[in-house]
Image (spheres, rainbow, N blue to C red):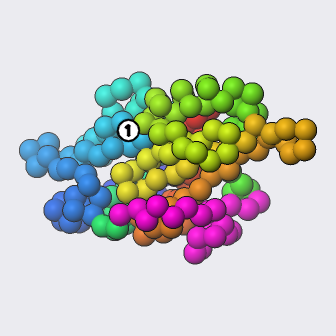
Amino acid sequence: MNTGESHAWERLKSLASEDVCSRTGATFDREGNAYSLGLYNQRIGVSLGTGEICGTTPEADHLLNALSYFSRLSVLSFLIHAKDVPPSGNLVKPAEMPGMEAMVRGSHTLPLHKLTARYAGDLKAFLERGKTYGGIPQDYGDASLLLHPFEVLPVVLIIRAGDEEFPANSSLLLDTTSRFQAPPDILWCIMMLSVLLMM
């Protein structure tokens, strides 16, 4: 467990569970001393007693183990920082969000090209993969999905198959309220997680 995660656990333990639940939509089991919340349509448990984050499905295990670098701190940070603010339905590019421009440049560039390479020629597979994690098809591009990393923090992935004039490409959009739900570095982790889980 890294220093950032250890600090997050201590911070979460110091918060009133009633407040955490009212802000995030999570539930709290007092007997088990654990939160339960949704992560990409998978139910996961966050145990304050054991310091474990676990799920009950192969999809949840993939998120929490294979993609643990991005998922574990995202879950803890969401429980700590999220506000009781519903999504606005207004979508923007991540770079247009306050404090996010530096988080999507250089070494932080999202691997959307890999999403394009994997799915531009098989949009049906993209939509099917998304359904595994609760993805809802949208009307953007040639194929798009609305994912919910967390209930109040939606992410939209878009693929354009390309043609003779324009090459295939992929993009990601955030709701304008995302800035209330997690700090910029955690939003970046959530965006990375959203792209990687589709791979």
Instruction: Give the camera-side residue of 22 and 81.
Output: 22
Kindly identify the residue that appears in the image at 18 percent across and 60 percent down: 17
Query: x%, y% of residue 71?
Result: 47, 46
Kindly identify the residue that appears in the image at 39 percent across and 43 percent down: 39
Instruction: Give the camera-side residue of 170 and 188.
Output: 170
Q: In this view, does 24 lie to the left or right of 99?
A: left
- Label 1 crowd bin: few (<14), some (14–19), many (20+), radius 10 Å: some
Query: x%, y% of residue 101?
Result: 67, 69
Q: Work out which quarter of the rendered image holds the C terminus and state it.
A: top right
**Residue located farthest toward the bottom when viewing the structure as drawn:** 98
Instruction: Give the camera-side residue of 90 and 148.
Output: 90
Quarter of the image holding residue 122?
A: top right
Q: Is residue 65 left or right of residue 49?
A: right
- Magenta stretch encompasses residue 31: no
Judged from the image, the secondary structure of the residue bearing numbered disc 1 is loop
Q: In this view, does 199 lie to the left or right of 77?
A: right
**Residue located farthest toward the right when viewing the structure as drawn:** 164
**Residue located farthest toward the left when viewing the structure as drawn:** 31
The residue that mark 1 highlights is 41
Kindly identify the residue that appears in the image at 36 percent across and 26 percent down: 57
- Magenta stretch encompasses residue 89: yes
**Type of residue at label 1?**
Asn
Query: x%, y% of residue 198?
Result: 58, 35
58 over 107 or under it: above or below:
above
Query: x%, y% of residue 153?
Result: 43, 56
Residue 49: tell me if it is visible.
no
Residue 138: tell me if it is visible.
yes
The residues colored magenta run: 86-106
Kindly identify the residue that appears in the image at 46 percent across and 29 percent down: 132
123 over 37 or under it: above or below:
above
